[in-house]
Amino acid sequence: PDGSGRRVFRLTAQTGESKLLPGKQTPTWGINGALLGPTLRARRGQKVSVSLTNSLPDATTLHWHGMHLPAEMDGGPHQMVRPGADWNPEWEISQPAATLWYHPHPHGSTADHVLRGLAGMFIIEDDEADRSGLPNSYGVDDIPLILQDRQFNDDGTLDLSGATFMQSLAGVGSPGVLGDTILVNGTYDPHVQVSTTLVRFRLLNGSGARTYNLGFTDSREFHLVAQENGLLEKPLPLRRLQLTPGERAEIVVAFKPGERVVLRSFEPELGLQFPTARLGGQEDTFDMIEVRARDRLTESRPLPDTLRGAPSAISVPEKARTRSFAFNSFTINGKSMDMSRIDEVCPAGEVEIWEVTGDAEVVHNFHVHGATFNVIEYAGKKPDAWLRGPKDTVRVPPGDTVRLAVALPPHTDAKTPYMYHCHILRHEDLGMMGQFTVV
Ligand code: C2O
Ligand code: CU
Ligand code: CU
């Protein structure tokens, strides 16, 4: 913080080299380092001011995924930062505690820039959520886990050729590029040591295309306590949790002294097969990270029954307007992204119903900038409990519809749009994105 309590973040996007695979060097991109970026934290009510310097060879942007802020500060494809230039967005944190993230958003190159290593977490805190009783010592019992897959060449360089690969498979329903190596917080073959009986993990699926179906190797129960845009009203016991690219979740897990258990991604139940798994005959199961509990653990406060600081459900007015978005062949409503076309003009601060209909053959998800939504119907049914929290990204059922109650941003700007898009990054780059302004 500076003297006025403002959070000031000085960020430099830069090239570097990372030791990821044993005995190899990988050229990567990062923020203030060679790979990924620092976890940024700010409190509700605080002013944030960022100064981003682009020291990369390419123009890029930095988008605050999940943040409620004016469109000009959003870091979408209209806020490009040339090599050598600076960008200085400022805004006030006006939303409840949540696990957000940041990543580049240059139209057509988002997948490339994210896969090279640009991404980080942005944690929002608030006084109410501080009193929820959840573990909240950062790095001790409150641990961020950025889950990503990568494809490497034999010489240790990143294989970024996903677009060609994806296009060659598009006819048979490719979800996009899938890597066979998992990195967690930019670490290959990772483990984490824990020292308390309860640990909160902030999970981010920061992958380009892969969906994870997370659980522990002993199928132990854990509690979901938050989704992308804030806490749930009550902890929800689960054994498996699906996260599509861009989605976040916070879970609380209990550990016994001295034990080891692996967080694994199991074969996803996507309703569609992964063509790579099908064609390659391999299983789509990955060990994400091993958790090692110390021999002595500090006793945590028990998990609360209800969570203070949970935002209330978005209430939908009776006359709420409905907008429909249909996914088809890498288009939305038959249109491919056009930077100079505004697709939707929306009323500031209103609640609308957005219904998104999936492609029958390709799995997609849907993300809205600057807004929080609740899933009110999923494939014709009331959504499962784990889908009912405050969200900004959701899987779209193939050939079926998801209905969302979207709380539109209050910040008006007739010229600068926000984005909505599929968060499978190659799909977005191919044009599965649209623009809305708020007036
Ligand atoms: Cu994660 Cu349009 O963004
Ligand atoms: Cu976003
Ligand atoms: Cu998609």
Image (cartoon, rainbow, N blue to C red):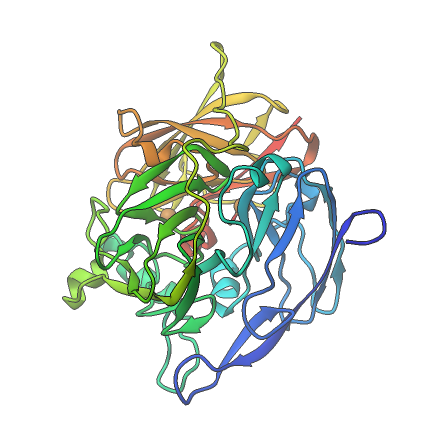
Q: Is residue 193 visible?
A: yes
Compared to residue 311, the image places residue 55 above or below, namely below
Q: What is the x, y in percent for residue 370?
A: 58, 38
Specify the farthest residue to the left.
281
Q: In which quarter of the view is residue 218 placed?
A: bottom left
Q: In which quarter of the view is residue 93 placed?
A: top right
Q: Nearer the viewer, residue 251 or 32?
A: 251
Q: Residue at x 61, y 44 (%)?
A: 125
Compared to residue 280, the image places residue 110 above or below, namely above
Specify the farthest residue to the right.
3
Q: Residue at x 17, y 67 (%)?
A: 282
Q: Residue at x 31, y 37 (%)?
A: 358
The C terminus, quarter of image: top right
Q: Is residue 148 visible?
A: no
Q: What is the x, y in percent for residue 206?
A: 45, 57
Q: What is the x, y in percent for residue 172?
A: 22, 54
Q: Nearer the viewer, residue 393 or 414?
A: 393
Compared to residue 318, the image places residue 269 above or below, namely below
Specify the farthest residue to the top.
318
Drawn side of residue 279 relative to residue 24, left or right:
left
Drawn side of residue 410 relative to residue 89, left or right:
left
Q: Nearer the viewer, residue 88 or 341?
A: 88
Q: What is the x, y in percent for residue 305?
A: 41, 32
Compared to residue 344, the image places residue 341 above or below, namely below
Q: How many marks?
A: 0
